[in-house]
Image (cartoon, grey):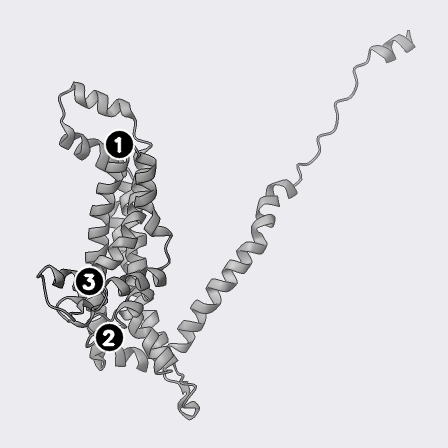
Amino acid sequence: MAQAAAVAKPPAPPRRRRASATPRRLPYLLIAPAALLMLGFIAYPVISVFYYSLQEYNPTKPWRNGFTGFDNFVHAFTEDPLFWDTLVFSAKWVVVEVGLQLLFGLALALIVNQTFAGRALGRALVFSPWAVSGVLTSAIWVLLYNSQTGITRYLADVGVGSYGTSWLSDTSTVFPAAIVADLWRGVPFFAILILADLQSVSKDLYEAAEVDGAGRIKQFWYITLPHLKDAIVLSTLLRAVWEFNNVDLLYTLTGGGPAGVTTTLPLYIANTSVDAHNFGYASALTTVAFVILLFCSIVYLRLSKFGGQDK
């Protein structure tokens, strides 16, 4: 009987092992090296800029180097007219460029989203300028604007304009010429992002709108645009930051000229640091540009209610 009772006794439940914390931490451990490298490459330059913005630092005049406090910032806001001129032009450049790129990019995205013969080739042609580097884009447009072999010569052949005219050396035409050159490369960025978001719009919404008698304009206004809101907000913000920091295209096309009318704040910073070797003042200008971009980005995201639901 004792042996039968011993056999019938159910086995004791297994002990529960404490869940190891290592599997939960494993993803963070795996990305830690890359995160530390990115933090080092980003944090160190930012801290260095803030540090040198409070210094008088010019390698060609080491006897003048030292701590100056906020003198660089005071000089920028009260004594340097070029700072305000370049800041105003930077704002003008960003507003015009981003606005036009958004309009043309949206139009191209809507076109290539339709079904037609050769759509794949059309999309490739629309998106191809985005694969070209900024310096190469500038070189292409420098050749196109060349007064001897470019567009102006062929226009002069048909009686439009005169020979030897250079749009990049005339203060009245250099801004539109630079705008067109940057549009050629910037429009595909908007077209790519907007087209990607258009692919996710349900066709049932348009079919229901057609049944209710809504035309193409109403469908675009009440279905397409609300669906594209976050994509438009994000793309315009990213492009605005990139256009504000645009140096390669304007530097290669115009060098900030003629007479400094196309000098943006980042281009002025580059000239101040590289040409004048005034790294302290250039760091102060960089800090000001950083604060301006940060403030404008926060305000823009708040006003646009990015990522939220419209009431």
Horizontal side of residue 291 vs 218, given as left or right: right
**Distance between the Cα atoms at labels 1 and 3?**
31 Å
Q: Nearer the viewer, residue 32 or 143?
A: 143
Horizontal and vertical percent for residue 253? 27, 67
Please identify the quadrant where the C terminus is shown.
top left
Q: In the rendered image, which residue does mark 2 sit on?
A: 83
Please identify the quadrant where the N terminus is shown.
top right
Mark 1 crowd level (few <14, some 14–19, many ≥20, 10 Å Cα)? few
Q: Are marks 1 and 2 in contact (CB under 8 Å)?
A: no
Amino acid type, label 3: Ala
Q: Single out the residue that lies furthest toward the top.
A: 1
- Say which element carries label 1: loop
**Distance between the Cα atoms at labels 1 and 2?**
46 Å
Q: Residue at x 24, y 75 (%)?
A: 83
Mark 2 crowd level (few <14, some 14–19, many ≥20, 10 Å Cα)? some
Q: Are marks 1 and 3 in contact (CB under 8 Å)?
A: no
> Label for residue 177?
3
> Label for residue 214?
none
**Distance between the Cα atoms at labels 2 and 3?**
24 Å
> Label for residue 114?
1
Amino acid type, label 2: Phe
Of callouts 1 and 2, which one flags the residue occurring earlier in the amino acid sequence? Answer: 2
Name the front one of labels 1 and 2: 1
Name the front one of labels 2 and 3: 3
- Say which element carries label 2: helix
Amino acid type, label 1: Gln
Q: Single out the residue that lies furthest toward the bottom.
A: 63
- For the question of whether residue 311 can be seen, the reply is no
